[in-house]
Amino acid sequence: MSVSSTSAAPDGAIAQLTPEQKRKESRRVILSSYLGSSIEFYDFLLYASASALIFPTVFFANLDPLAGTIASYGTFAAGYLARPLGGAIFGHFGDKLGRKKMLVLSMFIMGIASTLIGLVPGSATIGSWGAILLIALRMCQGIAVGGEWGGAALMALEHSEKGRRGFAASFTNAGAPTGAALGTFILGTTAAVLPHDDFMTWGWRIPFLLSFVLLIIGMIVRSRISESPIFLAALEKDKNNKTAQKKKLPIIEVLRRPRALILTMLAGASGFALQVLLSTFSVGYATEFGAERSSVLYAFALASVISIFFVIFFAHISDRLGRRPVMLAGLIMFVAYLPAFFKMMESNNWWLIFAAFTIALALHAIIFGPLAAFISEQFGTGARYTGASMGYQFATLLGAGFTPAIISSLYASTGGTSVTPVIMYLIGLAVVSGGAIMLTRESKDFDLETQEH
């Protein structure tokens, strides 16, 4: 059997492929995970920029600017509240029915929700109903991305060879900065091309409406991959094992031994707080000191593109040195860099702002690159989709869901004169995450095919 560049190996047939054919199939799945994750995070993180720069005016015009920003960040948090729910739902069916089916469904939900966000009327037209609809669609986004990450990471991880799992799974995480860069670039271009009033009235909707085009592309890509061979092997083993029919639900398997779930949740929290700091608060912070909105967005977008290579590189390093030491080093270096980062953001100099984002995202990549493999490797095959998804999504909720509102409130408490409380909050989260990482098992050499939860 040959594997062409345009068609996947049929599900169930991948075990009969030659080593070279398996490597080709693995590369196809990795590419699919990267592209699919990029599209989903384009949708999800586009909302982050919009919540900082647009939604306070469009949907909360009746509030003062600071209150409007905090309210907008509240709708942003709704997506993070829904992500663990999406992880549990998609994880359950992904562990029962397969990874591929859930990836297609998650992408469909995300694409439709994001497109509809671009059609929601503002408060000037339908009053508070605009914000209500925004929250509902944001929760749909959260449910979708809650199912997306686990499936994409596991497909890449479970198709790859031991010794390359961190590298393979990192392409799923590389989709986040890719999607952020794409969304920020399109939003920034739209803001630069259109007059300010036109942009705030209808121009901001264009990037959301483009989600429908990306949805079609993503569905085509997802339809061309084969199911995880490790999942198929486990499914076949269960069919031939009568006692396997009595296995508990995947979520029960995860919750009856919650140590792995709790530690992965805490371990990832700080990385997500730092990520959302860059995509939300820091953008508004730079504009407060005179930088143009579109210029800051371009700086962040370009730095995000560069960070993709750092994400993959440091994941590769974690295949050699281990997940734990690499991630701990990233946490320490990032929090040590925070005071300098804010000083550079205050400069009103595009090159310094761009350098600040680039350094920050490179340091964040040291944490983020190994994270997909680190979390996924803590769980057995029968509950891996559920466990990895819930661990990752609870980490995003704890670390990122409320961080924009919290750090904005901390900054406001100083009268907008000092970021010291913000830095102390982020250092506190880093200490919690570092402690959790130290308590986990080093997982780079685990055998995923025989591993039990």
Image (cartoon, rainbow, N blue to C red):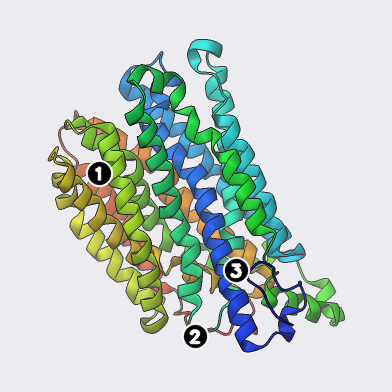
Give percent across and percent down for residue 301: 34, 47
- The residue at 76%/72% (across/down) is 10
Tell me the CA gap for discs 1 and 3.
Answer: 40 Å
Q: Which of 267 and 15 lies nearest the eye of the viewer? A: 15
Left or right of 29: which side holds 415? left
Left or right of 183: which side holds 138? right
Q: Earlier in the sequence, mark 3 or mark 2?
A: 3
Give the amino acid type for the residue marked by disc 1 in the picture: Val
Residue for badge 1 = 422
Tell me the CA gap for discs 1 and 2.
Answer: 38 Å
Q: Earlier in the sequence, mark 1 or mark 3?
A: 3
Residue for badge 2 = 445
Q: Nearer the viewer, mark 3 or mark 2?
A: 3
Residue for badge 3 = 29
Crowding at dot 2, Cα within 10 Å, few <14 / some 14-19 / many 20+, comes out as: few
Instruction: Tell me where residue 436 sits by quadrant.
Output: bottom left
Q: Nearer the viewer, mark 1 or mark 2?
A: 2
User: Looking at the rendering, in which quadrant would you find the N terminus?
Assistant: bottom right
Q: Nearer the viewer, mark 1 or mark 3?
A: 3
- The residue at 76%/64% (across/down) is 96
Q: Tell me, yes or no, whether the two marked residues, 1 and 3, touch with CB atoms within 8 Å.
A: no
Left or right of 80: which side holds 417? left
Instruction: Tell me where residue 286 sits by quadrant.
Output: top left
Q: Earlier in the sequence, mark 1 or mark 2?
A: 1
Give percent across and percent down for residue 7: 69, 68
Mark 2 element type? loop
Mark 3 element type? helix
Left or right of 394: which side holds 298? left
Q: Tell me, yes or no, whether the two marked residues, 3 and 2, touch with CB atoms within 8 Å.
A: no
Tell me the CA gap for discs 3 and 2.
Answer: 22 Å
